[in-house]
């Protein structure tokens, strides 16, 4: 995956968490996802289409998802709350949308978010593009951002 896309997601994670929740994020070294490496209890998923295709997943353990959703919404949230999945989905949407603005030279659209809740679930890895896992740590806990992207064209030259 092009480092430009990795940098776009790292910048987006830092920006969204700082702006929306006043939470600093320590971003670890990105690594390729191993099938058995990453499982989660809550995942917010966004698809990308157009000249950049793939998916972005924010993966949390349940206590971290509750803390993040609560900080994002400004009110206590638990998985039974009607707004819990909306908060996780909107957070994934904001991370993907904020990163997309830095896909210079590429046109891309993002899907509506989907949220999966279930202990130890795994989102299958793309056969075309492996997931890059961006580990993140905050005062609310640890989570991962998983990104799998392919490009459908060569980007336009700057100034062209």
Image: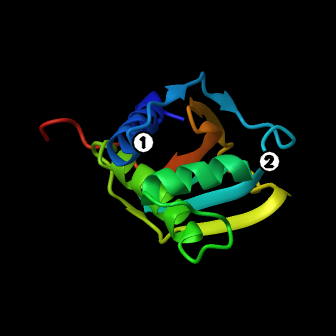
**Residue appearing at x 48%, y 33% in the figure:** 6
**Residue 87 on image: x %, y %:** 50, 64
**Residue appearing at x 63%, y 52% in the figure:** 65
**Residue 39 on image: x %, y %:** 80, 47
Relative placement, left or right, of 120 versus 55 is: right
Q: CA distance from mark 1 to mark 2?
A: 22 Å
Whether 136 is drawn above or below 122: the answer is above
**Residue 139 on image: x %, y %:** 56, 32
Look at the image and tell me whether residue 20 can be seen: yes
Residue count near mark 1 (Cα–Cα under 10 Å), binned few <14, some 14–19, many ≥20? many
The tag on residue 39 is 2
Residue count near mark 2 (Cα–Cα under 10 Å), binned few <14, some 14–19, many ≥20? some
**Residue appearing at x 46%, y 63% in the figure:** 90
Whether 61 is drawn above or below 93: the answer is above
Label pair 1/2, CB-CB below 8 angstroms: no
Residue extending furthest bottom?
Answer: 82
**Residue 140 on image: x %, y %:** 58, 39
Look at the image and tell me whether residue 127 can be seen: no
In depth, the one of 19 and 47 nearer the eye is 19
Residue extending furthest top?
Answer: 29
The quadrant the C terminus occupies is top left
Q: Which residue is mark 1?
A: 17
Whether 147 is drawn above or below 94: the answer is above
Relative placement, left or right, of 118 versus 109 is: right
The answer to which quarter of the image holds residue 136 is: top right
The quadrant the N terminus occupies is top right
Whether 156 is drawn above or below 87: the answer is above
Give whichever of discs 1 and 2 has the lower sequence position. Answer: 1
Tag 2's secondary structure? loop
């Amino acid at each position: 995956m092009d480092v430009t896309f990795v940098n776009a997601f790292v910048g987006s994670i830092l920006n969204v968490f700082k702006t929306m929740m006043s939470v600093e994020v320590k971003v670890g070294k990105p690594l390729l996802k191993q099938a058995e490496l990453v499982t989660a209890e809550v995942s917010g998923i966004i698809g990308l289409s157009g000249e950049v295709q793939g998916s972005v997943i924010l993966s949390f353990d349940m206590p971290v998802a509750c803390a993040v959703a609560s900080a994002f919404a400004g009110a206590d949230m638990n998985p039974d709350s009607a707004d819990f999945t909306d908060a996780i989905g909107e957070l994934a949407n904001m991370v993907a949308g904020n990163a997309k603005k830095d896909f210079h030279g590429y046109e891309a659209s993002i899907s509506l978010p989907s949220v999966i809740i279930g202990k130890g679930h795994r989102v299958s890895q793309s056969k075309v593009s492996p997931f890059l896992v961006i580990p993140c740590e905050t005062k609310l806990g640890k989570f991962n951002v998983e990104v799998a992207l392919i490009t459908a064209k060569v980007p336009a030259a700057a100034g062209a």
